Amino acid sequence: MMPLLGAKPFRNVTVGAILAGLAVLCILTLAVLYCLTVPHRSRADALLHNISELKLGRSTFADAQLLAHQYGGIPWYVSPTDMTCTFQRCKFAFQWDNMPLSYVPGVGYTRFLALINITNGVVVGRELEYESSRGTSRYFRYLVLDYEGTPPAGWAHGLWRLNVDPHGVPHVLQVNMGPSSSNGLRERAYALKLSCLARFYGCGSPYAIYPKGLAYTGPPSQGLVPNEQ
């Protein structure tokens, strides 16, 4: 009898089976994490469309409440002492991110935040924030501030390139809009692709976060982009 000869193949098969099992387990885990994250992207896409359809100065508190009910919006810093929404003053916040997919090494973190501002029963403003972090050098943040009335002091309406690196790429891109903003700028500003809320790779660059229609590249200096009002 030669038991050692019979043990070797058995040992090899066992090790191979363990490795194959681990590979299958990893694939299944990634698939589960992806499936858990995809609904975040779908709901964020739907909300983005609905928010862009709101008419500032005409859409009502009831319109905003309906969106809050459909998409899980919550009152957001209505006042320092009271978070209760009222007809006179309310701000609803909506947020989705790419968790639990972000737990996968190398994927990074992506978040989408939307705000609806109501004053005296009328929607007077909306804000968007879309950011992706894949390390210090690959952090990109996109902001939309769309309000009735004049912009805050020092912040003219238009496209702002901020935190610009030596290659002329802004790591923060901000669009300020108001009643005088062109329809073209408004359409480009809301033409967001939220695919990075459910992606494994390809989100560490500005073109994955910023809308394609906005001229965000330029000289290595920050400020208001000419002819983008």
Image (cartoon, rainbow, N blue to C red):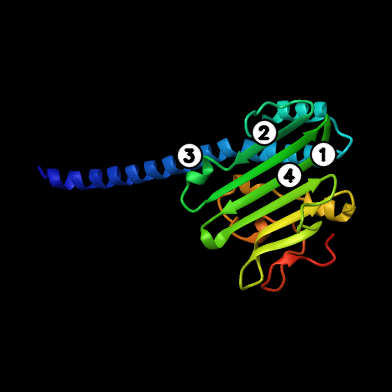
- Report the disc number at residue 79: 2
Give the mark nearer the N terminus: 4 vs 2.
Answer: 2
In the image, what residue type sits under mark 4?
Answer: Glu
Quarter in which the C terminus is drawn = bottom right
In the image, what residue type sits under mark 2?
Answer: Ser
At a point 66% along the width and 42% down the height, the residue shown is 113
* Structural distance between the alpha carbons of marks 3 and 4: 37 Å
The part of the image, by quadrant, that contains residue 120 is top right
Give the secondary structure at mark 4.
Answer: strand
Q: Which dot, 1 or 2, sits closer to the camera?
A: 2
Give the secondary structure at mark 2.
Answer: loop
- Report the disc number at residue 28: 3
Badge 2, how many Cα within 10 Å: few under 14, some, many 20+?
Answer: few
Q: Which dot, 3 or 4, sits closer to the camera?
A: 4
Q: Which dot, 3 or 1, sits closer to the camera?
A: 1
Query: Is residue 194 left or right of 121 when viewed as pictured?
Result: left
At a point 14% along the width and 46% down the height, the residue shown is 4
**Residue that label 4 marks:** 127
The percent coordinates of residue 64 (x first, y second) are 78, 31
Position above or below: 215 against 114: below
